[in-house]
């Protein structure tokens, strides 16, 4: 793009395969001849490519008539990808979770993304057939701005032998617009069976404005300053009851109430950053469903749903202090018992047997000296 912008002399740029008049690589048909006014140059094969260049395919064509029969709207597909993209994992150690899963089935095109803690899924009306592909998050990021400008979009799946991989079939997601054809390669791997994660039975539901909930979460997370936990990673407790959702910070540091239409009662804790990410993806009025304190939070709105994994409910400050006093008292009692055991005198050797009691009548009187017989002494 920088090269084309730097060309001067005419608004028309001709880019054609180099002919035999060129030298080197161009003479063998492995380059391009560029003509723009008085400017003429040759671009060799592989120019501007480096180790960071993605292995994607883009075909540009100019046609005076409609060449694409659309099956999706460009903005519709761009919005759908934008809502699931935040749920992909940025960690290179988990390449499968770095992808957006695209599934065609039952007349729907389903987009799924998950990072192990949150999950987003959206369904779009589509044509019949069955196919799927895993598209890397970086390819999706580059596709979204182009879809915003495209007037007609056709999405399809392609399989063809890959000569660089022993002739095995390579999957691709094909996105056709009026001017550009995008071929996004599918990543090889098995995506987790995410369907089992969605709860089926719920004990409480609440419908509320996500914008109000996001403001409440951000204000509560901003008042902590005396621990090492990152601001957005701190836990928040959600309580659903009496036509309101109460959002509380830990240790009674603050709470805010969001008006809602509720049914049932439930309480659950969640990391602040995960909850805010899901609320932003939903937008507008969303319905929150709770199954138990240990089950994921389900948020749904207009064919879109996402999950947020819960956290262990944080203990209140009063309960924590009471438990600490009880543990300290128990430790002191054990220490005193050990001290008494160490200071008590210990007996050594065999215990002395008590002497038997002798009655007075059993004691023999000594004989008088005159009655004793003399004993000879040598």
Image (cartoon, grey):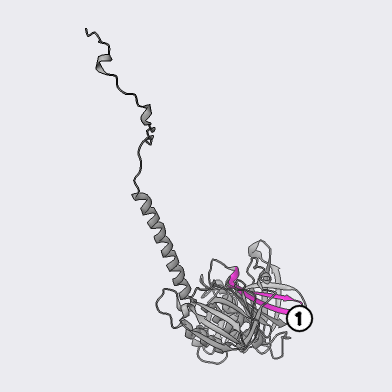
Task: Left or right? Give the position of 260 relative to 371.
Answer: right
Res 203 quadrant in image: bottom right
Queried whether the magenta region covers residue 106, the answer comes back as yes
- On screen, residue 213 above or below 344: below
Which residue position holds label 1? 127
Horizontally, is 317 left or right of 23 in the view?
left
Q: Residue at x 24, y 8 (%)?
A: 376
**Residue 250: percent from the left, percent from the top?**
48, 77
Q: Residue at x 56, y 74 (%)?
A: 26
Q: What segment carries the magenta color?
A: 96-114
Q: Nearer the viewer, residue 13 or 244?
A: 244
Q: Quadrant of residue 66?
A: bottom right
Residue 278 placement (x, y as % from top left):
58, 81
Please indicate, yes or no, whether residue 206 appears anywhere in the rendered image: yes
Is residue 282 rendered to the left or right of residue 5?
Answer: right
Q: How many marks?
A: 1
The x and y percentages for residue 175 are 67, 80
Q: Which residue is rendered at x = 38% and y = 36% of the image?
A: 351
Most extreme residue toward the left, as rendered? Answer: 378
Residue 45, position in %: x, y? 56, 73
Q: Residues within 10 Å of mark 1 (few under 14, many from 20)?
A: some
Secondary structure beneath dot 1 equals loop
Q: Is residue 15 visible?
A: no
Q: Magenta: predominant secondary structure element?
A: strand
Q: Residue at x 38, y 57 (%)?
A: 336
Residue 345 within the magenta-colored segment of the rendering: no
Q: Is residue 72 left or right of residue 219?
A: right
- Image quadrant containing the C terminus: top left
- 247 or 272, which is in the foreground? 247
């Amino acid at each position: 793009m920088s090269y084309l912008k730097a060309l001067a002399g005419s608004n028309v740029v001709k880019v054609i395969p180099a002919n035999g008049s060129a030298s080197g690589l161009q003479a063998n048909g492995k380059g391009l001849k560029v003509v723009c006014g008085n400017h003429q140059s040759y671009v060799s094969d592989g120019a501007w490519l480096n180790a960071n260049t993605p292995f994607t395919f883009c075909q540009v064509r100019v046609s005076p008539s409609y060449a694409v029969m659309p099956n999706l709207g460009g903005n519709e597909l761009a919005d759908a990808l934008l809502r699931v993209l935040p749920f992909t994992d940025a960690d290179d150690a988990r390449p499968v979770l770095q992808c957006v899963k695209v599934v065609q089935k039952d007349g729907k095109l389903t987009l799924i993304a998950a990072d192990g803690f949150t999950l987003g899924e959206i369904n779009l009306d589509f044509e019949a057939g069955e196919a799927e592909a895993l598209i890397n998050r970086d390819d999706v990021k580059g596709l979204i701005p182009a879809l915003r400008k495209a007037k007609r979009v056709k999405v399809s799946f392609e399989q063809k032998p890959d000569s660089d991989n022993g002739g095995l079939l390579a999957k691709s997601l094909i996105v056709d617009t009026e001017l550009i054809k995008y071929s996004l390669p599918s990543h090889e791997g098995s995506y987790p069976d995410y369907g089992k994660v969605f709860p089926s039975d719920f004990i409480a539901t609440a419908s509320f404005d996500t914008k109000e909930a996001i403001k409440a979460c951000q204000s509560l997370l901003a008042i902590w300053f005396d621990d090492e936990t990152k601001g957005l990673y701190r836990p928040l407790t959600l309580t659903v009851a009496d036509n309101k959702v109460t959002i509380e910070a830990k240790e009674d540091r603050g709470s805010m109430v969001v008006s809602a239409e509720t049914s049932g009662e439930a309480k659950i804790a969640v990391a602040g950053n995960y909850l805010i990410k899901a609320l932003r993806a939903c937008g507008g009025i969303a319905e929150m469903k709770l199954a138990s304190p240990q089950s994921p939070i389900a948020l749904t709105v207009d064919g879109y749903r996402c999950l947020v994994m819960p956290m262990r409910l944080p203990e209140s400050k009063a309960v924590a202090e009471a438990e600490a006093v009880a543990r300290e008292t128990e430790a002191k009692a054990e220490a005193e018992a050990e001290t008494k055991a160490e200071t008590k005198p210990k007996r050594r050797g065999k215990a002395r047997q008590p002497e038997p009691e002798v009655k007075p009548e059993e004691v023999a009187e000594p004989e008088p000296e005159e009655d004793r017989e003399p004993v000879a002494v040598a």
